[in-house]
Image (tube, helix red, strand yellow):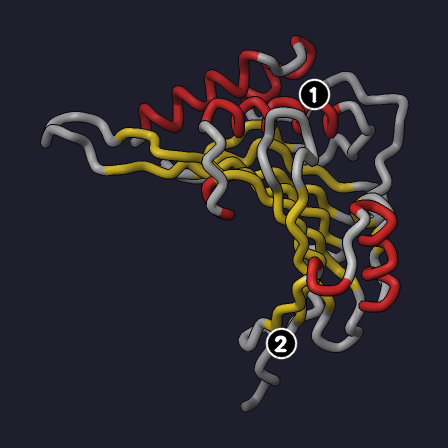
Amino acid sequence: MRKIAAALLVSLMATLPATAQNSAVSGQSPAAPSAKQARVEGFRNARFGMTEAQLREAIGKDFKLSGDDIQKVEDPTERTSALIVKVKDLLPDSGPAVVAYLLGYKSKKLFRVNVIWGQEIGSPVKPEQIVGTANSLRNYLLAQGYQQTGLILNQPLDSDNILVFQGTDTQGRLTELILGILKRPPAKPDAQPEVSGASLRLSYVEKPGEPDIYRVPGGF
């Protein structure tokens, strides 16, 4: 399994800009800062702090979706809710994507957006296409001017997941891109597991250290 993660890491490194390759290997931030300054405010027309009604309007502007095309689900543990939409061709050759807009437990307003591609949403897209999408998104994000402190590129989390990108803006708002590897048992006992699929999750988070979710009160 470690060999599988290593092989995918090599695929990710193949298109990493030359100025960032050495720092990605060592886990350090790239030395050359961008002239831009990233601002993590949400996703497209959806902005942190929007109400459900405002989000529905933003989704309509972005994807021409409304009514039953926007599914609302509740999380009984965190007591948050989410508006979920399916989008075709969000990025070239990436297959369909699901966008989830999370509304907070107390505020009832947008505090996080997750965009998901691949096996996790039942998409038949090939693993190499998901890796290609991860490469493209990482390179795009790397050029947006995220803070150098805490910037992470292509860091294996375990045998199944790679943190392709993690960065924050000057307000501490987070962008995170995680590649997940799905495997099936090997055909022979001594063989390596085979990659059966891959998933990619892009997250924009308003307050990563203070998520607006339900917590059991202290002293319970």
Residue reaching furthest bottom?
Answer: 220
Q: Which mark is residue 79?
A: 2
Nearest-to-viewer mark from 1 and 2: 2
Q: Position of residue 199 (x, y in %)?
A: 49, 39
Q: Residue at x 82, y 60 (%)?
A: 55
Give the class, few, some or many, for how many residues have Cα within 10 Å of label 1's Cα (few <14, many ≥20). Answer: many
Q: Identify whether 51 is placed above or below 96.
A: below
* x 46%, y 17%: residue: 10
The picture places residue 220, in percent across and down from the top left corner, at 54, 90
Q: Label 2, secondary structure: give it.
A: loop
Q: Are marks 1 and 2 in contact (CB under 8 Å)?
A: no
Q: Nearer the viewer, residue 110 or 98?
A: 98
Amino acid under disc 2: Arg
Image coords of residue 49 (percent x, y): 85, 62
Q: Quadrant of residue 190?
A: top left
Q: Residue at x 70, y 42 (%)?
A: 175
Residue type at numbered disc 1: Pro
Q: Is residue 42 visible?
A: yes
Q: Position of residue 106 (x, y in %)?
A: 75, 77
Q: Secondary structure at mark 1?
A: loop
Q: Tell me what residue is drawn at x 84 percent, y 48 percent.
A: 41
**Relative height, residue 5 to residue 185 (above, below):** above
The quadrant holding residue 144 is top right
Q: Residues within 10 Å of mark 2 (few under 14, many from 20)?
A: some
The residue where tag 1 is placed is 30
Along the line of sight, which residue is nearer the eye, 219 or 176? 176
